[in-house]
Amino acid sequence: MFTTTRPAGAYRDLLASVLPEAHAQRAWTPEDGALPALFVSHGAPPTLEDGPWLQELFAWGQSLPKPRGIVMVSAHWENAPLSITNPAAGTPIVYDFGGFDPYYYTLRYDTPDATELSRHVAGSLADTTELYQHPSRGLDHGAYIPLMAMFPAADVPVVQLSMPSLDPAALFTLGQRLKSLREEGYLVVGSGFMTHSFAAMRDPRLAPYIDEFDQWAADAVARRDVDALIGYEAKGPAAKLAHPTADHFVPLLLTLGAGDDPSQAPVTRIDRYAFSNSIRSFQAA
């Protein structure tokens, strides 16, 4: 399924065409107000071979003012107590995948020093949450794969927080604790997958069930029905097929916690399928 003759070819084409535009992106100012919170379906390394997906991610990033920094919570880092990546510039990324072309293990996404951002995150959590500074961990692919397309100049500081549990309510609460960062020009991103079914990848006859869960979740997000989404395992149609494990769904709750303006419904920014799964992605005010 993931064999290729040109690994990351579409990504290399994207870089060749958009880097000047990316470098020229207007920086956030206080007059812009709070940045939104995002839920991104991040994909695996072969995302970097999907030109239309990369273009959608790049256009999304360009539609925003360039953030002062980015706080990511990815499906691929579960750790308790709550932990934060090493903020030093040049911290190596994590190749947390297997079975792909060797080229993918040479990828780099060298972002600037994020010490100031790390301190801001720690300050926003200080009164309720213990935060452990991980001494060596860099970004995992749930963080850097989408960011390589959204902010290809790699000129925005990034830190990643772990998921201390897979409890959807706990992730929603963590998102609420991060909400104030948005008002300071920091972008809060939950990175998962709207559906994450390897069974559907193997058997296209399961597509109607995947679509049913996707439509249910999209409707619940639009109505801000947080209770339904927290209880997705019992309330979502074909939930165990769409998400055999919770890790790729619960980052959505973090996004809704960080972007909980009841006057504005979250907006779908990407709505299509890849690898037989929904890659629906949201922006919440």
Image (cartoon, rainbow, N blue to C red):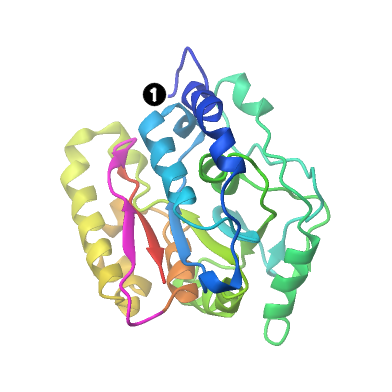
Q: Tell me the quadrant of the picture where the C terminus can be found.
A: bottom left
Q: Seen from this angle, which residue lies furthest top?
A: 5
Image point (61%, 73%), residue name: 181
* Rendered position, 259 above or below 157: below
The stretch of residues the image draws in magenta is 261-276
Image point (66%, 51%), residue name: 156
Query: Is 258 positioned to the left or the right of 118 in the image?
Result: left
Image point (76%, 40%), residue name: 92
- Is residue 275 shown in magenta? yes
Residue toward you, 72 or 68: 68
Residue toward you, 202 or 63: 63
Query: Is 198 positioned to the left or the right of 178 in the image?
Result: left
Query: Is 89 positioned to the left or the right of 187 in the image?
Result: right
Res 203 → quadrant:
top left
Image point (61%, 57%), residue name: 27
Q: Residues within 10 Å of mark 1 (few under 14, many from 20)?
A: few
Give how far across and how far down residue 79 sits, in percent.
66, 61
Q: Main secondary structure of the magenta part?
A: loop
- Is residue 27 shown in magenta? no
Determine which residue is flagged by label 1. Answer: 1
- The three-letter amino acid code for the residue at tag 1 is Met
Query: Is 40 positioned to the left or the right of 181 in the image?
Result: left
Local secondary structure at mark 1: loop
Give how far across and how far down residue 249 sits, in percent.
41, 59
* Rendered position, 157 above or below 121: above
* Rendered position, 4 above or below 164: above
Give how far across and how far down residue 208 sits, in percent.
16, 46
* Rendered position, 122 above or below 249: below
Give how far across and how far down residue 186 sits, in percent.
61, 66
Q: Seen from this angle, which residue lies furthest bottom?
A: 127
